[in-house]
Amino acid sequence: MKGKEKSLWMKRITGAGRSIGHQALMTIIAILIVMVFLAVSGYQPSAVMKGLGRAFTQDLAGTIRWATPLILAGVAVCIPFKAQVFNLGVDGQIYLGAIAATQVALMMPENIGGLGLIPVFIAGAAAGALFALIPALMKVYCNTDMVVTTLLLNFVGKLFTEFMTTEVMRDPGKVTQMNASRTLPENLWLPKITAFGSSSASVGFYIAVIIALVAAFLFFKTTLGYEIKLVGTNPDFARYGGMKPNLVVLKVMALSGAVAGVIGTIEVTAVQHKLIAAFNPDIGFDGIVVSLLANNNPLGILISGFFFGGLKNGGNVMQRVTEVPQIVTQIIRAIIILTISANVSIKWVRGRRERKLNGDHI
């Protein structure tokens, strides 16, 4: 029996690797398109390879810094996607998690030990979960479109963060800096990864890996994971089997929001050390691509999230070591994301068409 379980896990890992390998081909094609774009724009085509190369070799710490939130964002998107629930509000949930984590951290005494991080992370995860439950409850009781509600709540989260940093939590000692809270006590700063010294890589990366592994265990080894996949495949059959699809929607959104809240907590405890207005550079939307790249497999998200961390860091490196300006690096990232997303979208449309031809419920 143990041999069968081991074989099943190996198949899942192999499937995740196969999915990433297929998408790697699309990534290579995207890089070739980018090189043509750079050549036409008058820049050195090798700049993109130089940026990516340095991101994964000379500035691995920066890559890990960005891989951490992207892995978590991929997991946050993946959990509801498995149930065919589309959470486009991860960015807003990140903001709420950051606000709650900062507030709890600032309420603690300055001599608090590292154990003080536990309530800080709990507060961040709880705030993200509660904020994610708002569109879920609207879906369950009012049958609203979750794509619209979750998307619009991103603006609420962003504007609420600006209000908190400028009016409620603003550091009174810095009159000129109107968009940031007081600095968190140093004992509540998430430790750096010692292998990189005083780098931007923190133990938040380990937290991201653990959460991705827990998500994989949830999907593959628990009853809830089975219910999530069945509801996503055929909600009518799941309801006939005694399951409650609406309850599953609430559960997956709460879990997704909690993971997003952890992202916000890591950002304020490991990177910013304070709450800053508009600190979130669309991590949630990047998480959608990270999840799709891994075919919504948490194990694959570890790989795709690390790759996109290198891609994001590579753009910053490329700007520093070449003549390519920042706006061009953003266009390069967009080209790569669009190329990968187009391949995933074609597969999704093709599968949807096949299900329609077979007369299945969509």
Image: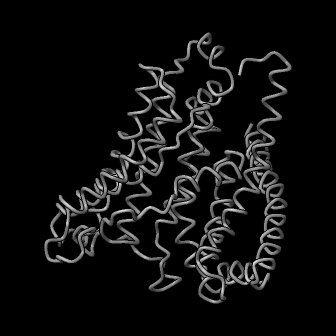
Give x and y (percent) for residue 332.
69, 69
* Depth check, front residue: 304 or 278: 278
* Depth check, front residue: 24 or 162: 162
Q: Is residue 134 left or right of residue 173?
A: right
Give x and y (percent) for residue 255.
47, 40
Q: Give the residue displayed 50% in from the left and 75% down from the top.
A: 201
Q: Quadrant of the N terminus?
A: top right
Quarter of the rendering containing residue 28: bottom right
Give above or below for 301 relative to 183: above
Q: Give the residue displayed 52% in from the left and 66% down from the top.
A: 205
Give above or below for 42 relative to 221: below
Give x and y (percent) for residue 49.
76, 80
Q: Give the residue displayed 68% in from the left and 59% down from the top.
A: 304
Quarter of the rendering containing residue 266: bottom left
Quarter of the rendering containing residue 95: bottom left
Give above or below for 136 relative to 33: above
Q: Give the residue displayed 44% in from the left and 61% down from the top.
A: 280
Q: Is residue 308 left or right of residue 113?
A: right
Residue at the front extreme, as displayed: 41
Give x and y (percent) for residue 40.
80, 77
